[in-house]
Amino acid sequence: MKINKIAIILTSVIAMSCTGDFEDMNKDPMAVSEVSPKLILPVMMNSGYHLVAGDYQRATTLYSALYCQYFANTANYFTSDSYMFNTAWAERGLWSAYYGNVIRGMREVAASLENHPEYTDMYQIMRINTAIMTIRMTDIFGDIPYTKAGYGETQNPYDAQKDIYYDVFNELTDAVAILKEARQNQLQYGDEDMIYQGNVEKWIKLANSVRLRAALRISFIDPNKAKAEGEAALKESLIASNEDNAAVTIPMPNTWYNPLIEAGGWNEFRASKTLVNILQQQSSVTDPRLELMLSQTEAYVKGEDRTVPRFQGVPNGLSTADVSLKQYNNEHNSGIWGYMWGFKWNSLAPDPTASLPNTHEVCPPLSVMNYSEVCFLKAEAALRNWAGAGNAKDNYENGIKASFADMRTLAPEGSYTSDNDNTYITTGNVKWNETDDFETKLEKIITQKWLGIYPNADEAWAECRRTGYPILNPVVLSLDPNINPANGEFIKKLRYVDNELTNNKENAENPALNGGKGDGLNVRVWWDTARYK
């Protein structure tokens, strides 16, 4: 593999431990008055997509991956699965990453465009990245500082989530229009762009697809705006196959890297019981993706206890005492070491690199948006009768098929069979029935989207809250007194971090935030119309 400056930067970052400090590395590129986007984009992607395993853990596996019930906690020193908020994790993994490197980087390059028109196309790609990351931030926290953020001030007013979404639509639309102009004398990204290596056409497809994603996100709260933006997106080029999938490929010298794989190797979570059950129970046959996504239980593989199922998940929100029980330990429950990651097959080997096929130079990239999701977006758009969406059934089934193909891309030869693909799609709760009502069809679409975008937990959690699907299991224990799982209640968002409450107190504690609901784990964001408790 070619060793380049991006590989060198990321090697130094990844070498740090999960509690190591990497902020100093991110300061230098931003310290000068003008700097090339080629230096800023890798820092933006590193922070915004959480490419260091410790930060991926703090931003995703300890929050959204638990709350969408892909994973469940198995470490008795973590309590976020039971809705205990940790401000240090949220600040470093999410808040500081976004405000310190993403939005700040955008402002830096924007200020230099007048003197450097050759940066124009590269800046549009940064705008698209920022839009993706902004949507995620506001989906997680609700109202956040936005229009005034990134200019070096700490006393920033908060923007309403509705206004943020409206601006993101403008950003995506404008970025696509400028990229389509195909102006001359433009500098281009190479490996600095860890998703498409500067391929403008693919960035246009991604931007339009994200616009459709955002349109459907607001479809219950703002249907007219949603339809207008969605239909406009559907007129444009979208991600059209797995070849267009947006995923962060992390170039490392002579090795591979994926932050989720590394975080999984720390043995602090296992598959959620919800995920395993849905994979096993949706159709008349087991989901063909089960062995692609998850590993067999170690106890079963070793034959130590044949009463343990081959695949088993952990309930979400166990108490620290229950986590220590034998039936919930790592050996008795499925990890993420399925075939989709390129592993030949393993029983949760401590060193997952030992199981990688030798022909693979890199680990599977970190997904941002895939073709399967776009199919399901179009299926829901068709269900809503949006122009240009096509046929709901065809889009729905194409989404499942695209997911099968995507998850098999790196699966070793002989590790899977497609014999049950058609049976899975055409039987049980998966089968599409034209006579079903809107709600039944929507549940099918979102449940399959939840599976098809795995392990994109931020998006999965947002969709669970937007639609109420798939139907999740209430956590066993809530440590937030305002959330009662016995009444079927779930966490709604993350609260603002302590440093913000200290340094931007007047704005962060404004009682008018989030539609007058203020802040808290039990506060719904703007587009959350209470389709779940």
Image (cartoon, rainbow, N blue to C red):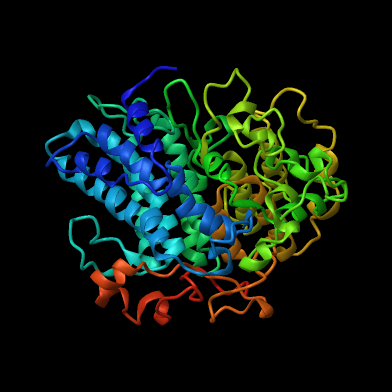
Residue 342 in the image, given as x and y percentages of width and height = 63, 29
Does the image show residue 178? Answer: no
Q: The N terminus is located in which quarter?
A: top left
Residue 247 vs residue 257, the one in the foreground: 257
Horizontal relation, residue 116 to residue 448: left or right:
left
Quadrant assignment, res 42: top left
Residue at screen point 67% across, 61% down: 324
Residue 21's place in the image compared with 495, above or below, is above
Does the image show residue 408? Answer: yes
Q: The C terminus is located in which quarter?
A: bottom right
Residue at screen point 87% across, 50% down: 307
Horizontal relation, residue 20 to residue 287: left or right:
left
Residue 189 in the image, given as x and y percentages of width and height = 32, 28
Residue at screen point 68% across, 31% down: 408
Residue 71's place in the image compared with 523, above or below, is above
Quadrant assignment, res 398: top right
Residue 493 in the image, given as x and y percentages of width and height = 49, 68
Residue 493's place in the image compared with 288, above or below, is below
